[in-house]
Image (cartoon, helix red, strand yellow):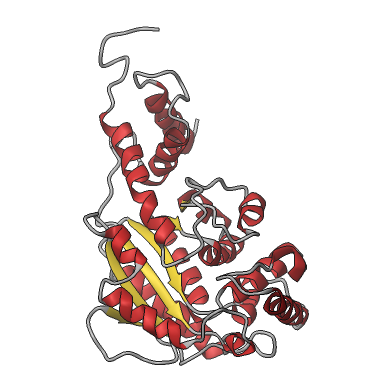
Amino acid sequence: MSTSIDLTQLIQNTINGKIKPIGSLGKIESLAAQIASVQITEPSHNKLHLQNPSLLIFAGDHGIAKHNVSIAPSDVTSLMVNCFINSQAAINSFIKDTDWQLHVIDCGIQRELPAQTAIINARLGNCCGDISEVPALSESQFKQAKINAEQIITNLNTNIIGFGEMGIANTSPASAIFAKLFGLSANDIVGVGTGINNDQLDIKRSLIDKAISRIDSNEPKNILRELGSFEIATMAFAMLESFKQNKLIIVDGFIVTAAAAIALAIEPQIKSHLIYAHVSNESAHKQVLARLNSEPLLDLSLRLGEGTGAALALPLIQAAVNFYNHMASFDDLGITL
């Protein structure tokens, strides 16, 4: 019997042996098993831990925004990044008095903010390409996104990372990625995003159809470079680096799931490290999660982004860790069933 099978059985026996009916804690049990599969590498270390939970918000602007496919202009991206830094946004409220450590990453917003320690500079430009017409990233920008992502993750002293995003119009590249990866049409995948009207929705769908028909390749890195964005590309590479460094990855909503889908297509084994925080109220997110064969922890009808769903998942993850580490077993109590 292989070591991996031994450890899998050890983990399941630990969970099944707790003083409760088997399976009675539902998703908490499967979550504990997933975390254990990542963190337990030998039988003598059968304990879980969370170290300095870090929430990253990747921000970037989008060329496709010039087509009025969002309710807000691109200037709002920089405005919101400034709000994150000054603790004024929804995500700041959600993580107040929690263990989350927030890091804001400028992957390329139109209005660059003054240099300050609260921002991680991973800029690839002021705005990614309009994916309906040209690649989102040049070859050199794509290579730099990977370098930036690897450096960001290496500099973090943590074993659990929540991924969030900010970028006006970024449901468009996310939709294009899903459409190309899964062979879907724009009608199948494109939704109202922040709340656009029907005329804007028609334009958005037309642009996404144009974008996905522009490229022939189904190679995931090519899809990411052509149809992604500064922040989605950097997120995807950051997830891959997090996997290499054996860190848990909490996936937020629709846009972050696009980065995760690309990362999975590049490296299928990353699935063991991905925790899907919630299902977004963006119409196609549930469909996408089903195609990824993944079940989210929460369904709160969120569609804001900013990592808000990822932030709310931390208490559940902590509960799973504490359940695994501290709940008594029947063996502890000398009970045989």
Residue 258, relative to residue 292: is it above or below? below
How many numbered dots are placed on residues in this image? 0
Q: Position of residue 90 (x, y in %)?
A: 36, 65
275 vs 65: above or below: above
- Residue 247 can be seen in this image: no
Q: Residue 61, image x and y in percent?
A: 49, 84
Q: Quadrant of the C terminus?
A: top left
Quadrant housing residue 124: bottom left
The quadrant in which residue 328 appears is top left
Residue at 72% across, 71% down? 218
**Furthest-top residue in this view:** 336
Does residue 68 appear in the picture of this structure?
Answer: yes
222 relative to 192, above or below: below
Indicate the position of residue 189 as horizontal and vertical percent values. 70, 65
Residue at image location 25% in from the left, 12% down from the top:
333
Where is 73 relative to 295, above or below? Answer: below
Front-most of residues 322 and 41: 322
Left or right of 45? Residue 185 is right
Which residue occupies 31% across, 55% down? 159
Q: Is residue 296 left or right of residue 224?
A: left
Give the left or right position of residue 192, taking residue 115 as reference: right
**Which residue is painted at 30% across and 41% down in the image?**
48
Q: Position of residue 68 (x, y in %)?
A: 62, 85
Viewer-proximal residue among 219 and 121: 121
